[in-house]
Amino acid sequence: MVGRGERLVRVQDGTLRELGQTFVQWRQWASWECAAVARSARRALTGSGPERDTAVQALKAAAAALIAWALAGWWWNAPMAMLAPWTALFLVQSTVYRSLKSALQQFLVVVVGTLLAAGAGALTGNTMSAMLIALPVTMLFGSYARFGTQGLNAPTAALFVLVYGTYSGFDILHRFLETLLGAAIGLAVNALVLPPVHSRSVRHLRGRLPEESAALLHTVADGLDEGDMGQEDAEAWHDRARRLTDRVTDLRTARRWSEESYRFNPGHRLRRSAPLPPAADWDYTWDRITNHLEAITRTLAETAVNRSGEAALPGPAPRIVAELLRAAGDVCGLDDTLEGSDSTGKDADEEAARRTRDRREALRRAYAAETELTSVFRERGDALQDALAAVTADTIRLLGDLSTVAGRDPEDGTDEEAGARHGDNAEAGGAGARE
């Protein structure tokens, strides 16, 4: 009995400890959530951003519902007045195009759901029997992919008709009119009152991508220059490069969102003017650049794994690659980033000219290091030639795309030198393949 009592006490103590740990975890979670909500509220009040956009859209939806109820319920005294604010509330969407699309979808499914329910009710004269007929059909109809989330309004409308027993033509007409009124109010409020335009994310990501690429290139260059590149460092670089490719995917998603926000948006000119997002050609160039960075860091990571404790690259190659990548990082960091400067007029022109000169100077330094690197590659014939060939080929491709970003100067090289580089690229790629 004593042993059993001791076991019971230990079980109780363990349970109490688990409950205490659970309470602490829940308290931490509640604290984090409250802090996050406070931060979001502060950002919404103090500056523009996604938090303020969300707050504005929520207040617009509430205002649209109030206006719809004031017209349908208070002034018109319509028998189905609830449908007007209910429809208006859900049609203040994140873009005007989405509001218009949702309005058309919702009106269509409401019409079909109402007519099916009214027909089933008139045919059977019994609410339960009418539900057995109408609900399966409206659920199947609403699940059609073209209706999206609005498809659930078909069975909802059918339930309203059957539960309230309003089958007459007068009641059905009122349902349609009040739904149309709510849709018109929701669409008008969204389009004319601070119409949503989502170009901020495109500009933000467009600025972050060159900055993060430059930071990665400088970090890799510092690691190679100091000669202490280890397996963990190389794998961390490769992980950062993979995240850069995710940035490009996020940028494309943000661009599609931005383009949608301008469609059927008659009121975006009523808002405070905002710069248009940059051209889409920029995305494709940086997609290739991030792929080259991923390839370079992958080669360094694989070499570090295969030759643990030994030099990843032969002789002077680490120093040369470091110079090349540092100069390439300077080109990335000097890429124009829209609102990167507060200068205007003549000062803005001088700032742009200075950045152009600095980019081209950095590009010349990168090409000089690349020429030296290809010379080292031609002189090598040992076991490290495969890694050197891969790095040489990847850096040549990287500089080719950075030339598009920086704008090549006529003094940057002659056609013969450009052809020699292409030949070195082919030679490096062929050597890598042979190895």
Image (cartoon, rainbow, N blue to C red):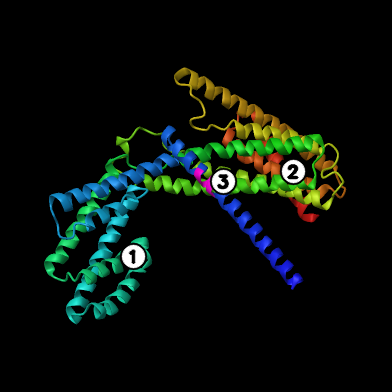
Q: Which comes sooner in the sequence, label 1 or label 2? A: 1
Residue 227 x/y as whole percent: 82, 37
Give the alpha-carbon distance from disc 3 to disc 1, as whole Å: 34 Å
Note whether 119 is above or below 320 in the view shown.
below
Label 3: which secondary element: helix
- The three-letter code of the residue at mark 1 reads Gly
- The three-letter code of the residue at mark 2 reads Thr
Residue 165 shown left or right of residue 159 in the figure: left
Residue 422 x/y as whole percent: 69, 43
Residue position for label 1: 151
Q: Are marks 2 and 3 in contact (CB under 8 Å)?
A: no
Using the image as rendered, state which of residue 23 and residue 319 is in the foreground.
23
* On-image quarter of the N terminus: bottom right
How busy is the neighbourhood of tag 3: few (under 14 within 10 Å), some, or many (20 plus)? many
Q: Nearer the viewer, mark 1 or mark 2?
A: 1
Residue position for label 3: 247
How busy is the neighbourhood of tag 1: few (under 14 within 10 Å), some, or many (20 plus)? many
Q: Which comes sooner in the sequence, label 3 or label 1? A: 1
Residue position for label 2: 392
* On-image quarter of the C terminus: bottom right
Residues in magenta, as a range? 30-34
Residue 421, by quadrant, is top right
Note whether 348 is above or below 4 in the view shown.
above
